[in-house]
Image (spheres, rainbow, N blue to C red):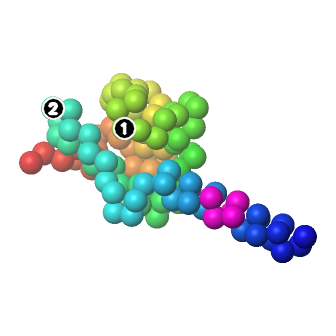
Amino acid sequence: MLNKLATVMAAVLMVVAMAGAVLSAPPGKVLEFNKSPMGTVYFDGKIHQEAGATCVECHNKEMFPKMKQGTISITMAEIYAGRLCGVCHNGQRAFAAAGNCNRCHVRK
């Protein structure tokens, strides 16, 4: 009986671990937002993770509830108002979005 329970628990843990791997962004993946006339914005989750941010800080019901690009409109007005990226990019937790256009927008 104990061996069956251990086998079931191991199977459940494997399923959970595999589901987490499927839902997380693969290493090295960078999102590209190219609809801005100011230049393309590249989002690298690894940079944010290295800065101490966790996925759930942004991917929650208030900010970015769906982990799918294009499900929410990101505007500078929203960011400057302290919403979306502006929650952190306010000059206190991370560099301020205002006055630092080239830190996010890249012209090619």
The answer to which of 90 and 15 lies nearer the viewer is 15
Residue 66, image x and y in percent? 49, 35
The answer to which of 37 and 9 lies nearer the viewer is 9
Element carrying mark 2:
loop
User: Which residues lie in the magenta part?
Assistant: 11-15
Residue 70, image x and y in percent? 35, 32
Q: Residue tagged by mark 1?
A: 69
Residue 86 position by quadrant: top left
Q: Main secondary structure of the magenta part?
A: helix
Residue 99 position by quadrant: top left
Three-letter amino acid code of the residue under disc 2: Pro
The answer to which of 13 and 37 lies nearer the viewer is 13
- Residue at the outermost right position: 1
Q: Residue at x 26, y 45 (%)?
A: 32
Three-letter amino acid code of the residue under disc 1: Gln
Q: CA distance from mark 2 to mark 1?
A: 18 Å
Mark yes or no: residue 37 visible.
Answer: yes
Q: Specify whether residue 77 is painted magenta.
A: no
Residue 49, image x and y in percent? 48, 59
> What is the number of the mark on residue 5?
none
In the rendered view, tell whether residue 88 sits above or below residue 50.
above
Q: Residue tagged by mark 2?
A: 37
Element carrying mark 1:
loop
